[in-house]
Image (tube, rainbow, N blue to C red):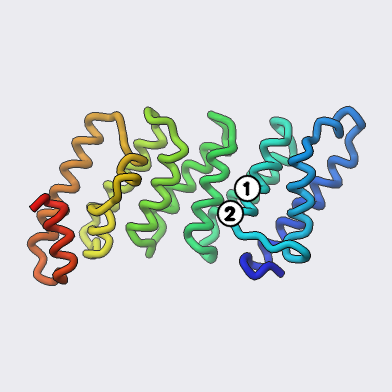
Amino acid sequence: MDENLPDDLVLACRRLAQQLSGEDEGLDATSRSRKSKEKKEALQVLLSVGDQRHCSFNEITDLLCTVYESSPLQSKARQHVAQLLLAWAQRRDLPFGDAVEAAHTLYLISPKGSEDKQQAIQMLLTQARWPDVTMKQSVEAVTALCYASPLRSKARDQGILVLLELAQRPDLSVEDALAFITLDSDQMCTIYTTSALLTKRQVAVRKQMLQALAQRPDLTSEQAGLVAEAFGL
């Protein structure tokens, strides 16, 4: 089996490839001719995962993306790929980044306004709120959502609101608070919003967090330096 992937994920990839290859064989010549070379190659790689071929999780999602985008709208292939990605996105036993990647991939490839896209959005928002995830991980999920969302979109603003809610938790650790306050420039650009009201709230929440952190007696010298830097001192 592939050393980079859980055994059941490897088997799911191979079953999916076998099923879709079989369905294509059952089509007439005209339908079969519409199957792209890229899709055939992707299915061949998926069939060999865990046997002759070793793939990372990102490589697997790229292959599934190829299969999805090379298949007709409303096809069983698209339905099966979407179901698989959503199932992986819901799994708490996978590395958090892999679960986010599954939801992010589904969001990217699914048509605008589709049920698949809505499920991907809700999954990324849910992942950000999962119990016991760090603020850094929540930022990862929301950043993935915002990265794939139009600048003026409900999904983007939903993601930013989730981050602000998490940032105001009374039990937020120093590490989690700093993870939010010290977002790098790329992350800040990704979670940018055109909503003046939401931008104002972002500034207010950040200011409140900095003031609360500055009063904590348990800061290390390094953490105190980060807070001072964020204050612009």
Q: x%, y% of residue 92?
A: 51, 62
- Secondary-structure class at tag 1: helix
Relative height, residue 96 to residue 155 (above, below):
below
Q: x%, y% of residue 40?
A: 79, 43
Quarter holding the N terminus is bottom right
**How much space separates mark 1 and mark 2, taking CA atoms?**
6 Å
Q: Amino acid at mark 2?
A: Asn
- Secondary-structure class at tag 2: helix
Q: Quadrant of residue 147?
A: top left
Badge number at residue 58: 2
Relative height, residue 88 to residue 5 (above, below):
above
Q: Quadrant of residue 178?
A: bottom left
How many neighbours does mark 2 have within 10 angstroms: few (below 14), some (14-19), or many (20 or more)? some
Badge number at residue 62: 1
Q: Residue at x 71, y 36 (%)?
A: 70
Q: Pointer 1 and pointer 2: residues touching (CB < 8 Å)?
A: yes
Badge number at residue 210: none
How many neighbours does mark 1 have within 10 angstroms: few (below 14), some (14-19), or many (20 or more)? some
Q: Quadrant of residue 75?
A: top right
Q: x%, y% of residue 118?
A: 51, 37
Q: Residue at x 58, y 49 (%)?
A: 86
Relative height, residue 227 to residue 122 (above, below):
below
Q: Residue at x 74, y 47 (%)?
A: 42
Q: x%, y% of residue 175?
A: 26, 64
Q: Amino acid at mark 1?
A: Asp
Residue situated in front as seen by the camera: 34 or 154 = 34
Drawn side of residue 197 relative to residue 145, left or right: left
